[in-house]
Structure formats: C-alpha cells, structure tokens
Image: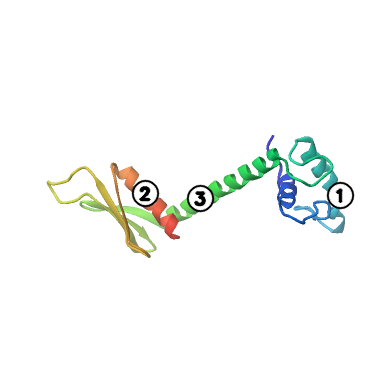
Amino acid sequence: MKPSYEMMHVLTMASRQGTDIWHVPLVNGKGSQSRTVGRSLTIEACWRHGWLERGTSNLTQAGREALHAETERKERLQQKRDHANLMKNGHWERGDRCHGFWIFGSRVAVIGLGPKHLWDGVYRWSLDAPTVLKGEAKSLIEAKRAVEYALLGVGW
C-alpha cells in the first residue's frame, strides 16, 4: 500500500533525529485541536503497515523504502514540471541545414547536419548559453532530447 500524505509526513518526521512524532502538528490540520486529533490514528496506521517499529518512532526498512520511493517520485515529477516549463517558454525552429531552439526570442541551442554533400549521418548539437556544451546523436529526435535535457541541467 502507498502511504497517504499524512503518513508520509509522519515518516518524514520519524526520519529526522530528535523529532518526536507525537508532538508534530498535522499537515492539513486546522486550529489548535488538530495537533492531537487524528495523529494517533496516522501513527497506528504506520505501525500496522510496518513502516514504523511498534510502540516507537523508529523507521523500519520498509518505512525507509517507502520514504525513498516517495522522494524519487517527487524528483521525477519536478523534472517533468521543469521540462514542461522549458517547452512552454521555448520552441524549435527548422532552418536550411539546422534546427534551433529559441527561448524568449534568443537562440540558445542549434542542431546541425554538417557540410553539404559530406554529411556522415551524425547530428551535432551545441548549447550557446550560459556555458558551451556540445554533443552528437544518431537521430534528430535524440539530438533534440539531448539539447532539452542539457538545458534543464544548465538551469534554463
């Protein structure tokens, strides 16, 4: 079973040293009574699923794995959001023997074919800003994907 949002909050608090999970307020609580109402049910559910050692606030191996899986899931979602934002602000334009990636009216990357009549079947790409990165790919789709991931790594 996948932990709920409240259970993940309890597991996160349990993973931090020196944090008492019984005195941490609920994530979605309202008012002063929310500090205790529902907390015991959430902790007992974590005990039942084997994510916490029964009677303590120590994480089990299954709890650490659930916490790690949730962290990886959040990182993947953030990468997808970053890629979507990049594609929302930028676009590809096709030229004579090259493709360019433009963001806010300036070209930041180019994919070229090489000299006319001497093309060796390799797409060469390069990033213009803020650092110069270069690479090669076998297909245009792979080159475009490499440019987009390089731009995400640079911080566009």
Amino acid found under the numbered disc labelled 2: Ala
Amino acid found under the numbered disc labelled 3: Gln
Could you tell me which secondary element the residue under label 3 belongs to?
helix
Asked whether 136 or 62 is in front, the reply is 62
Asked whether 88 or 115 is in front, the reply is 115
Q: Is residue 156 visible?
A: no
Q: Residue at x 35, y 64 (%)?
A: 129
In the image, farthest residue toward the left? 117
Above-or-below relation of 13 to 62: below
Q: Residue at x 66, y 41 (%)?
A: 66
Q: Is residue 64 visible?
A: yes
Counting from the top left corner in percent of width and height, residue 28 is at 76, 52
Q: Residue at x 58, y 45 (%)?
A: 72
Q: CA distance from mark 2 to mark 3?
A: 14 Å
Q: CA distance from mark 1 to mark 3?
A: 36 Å
**Quadrant containing the N terminus in the rendered view:** top right
Asked whether 134 or 113 is in front, the reply is 134
Counting from the top left corner in percent of width and height, residue 42 is at 80, 43
**Quadrant containing the C terminus in the rendered view:** bottom left
Could you tell me which secondary element the residue under label 1 belongs to?
loop
Report which residue position mark 1 lands on: 37
Disc marking residue 79: 3
Report which residue position mark 2 lands on: 146
Amino acid found under the numbered disc labelled 1: Val
Could you tell me which secondary element the residue under label 2 belongs to?
helix
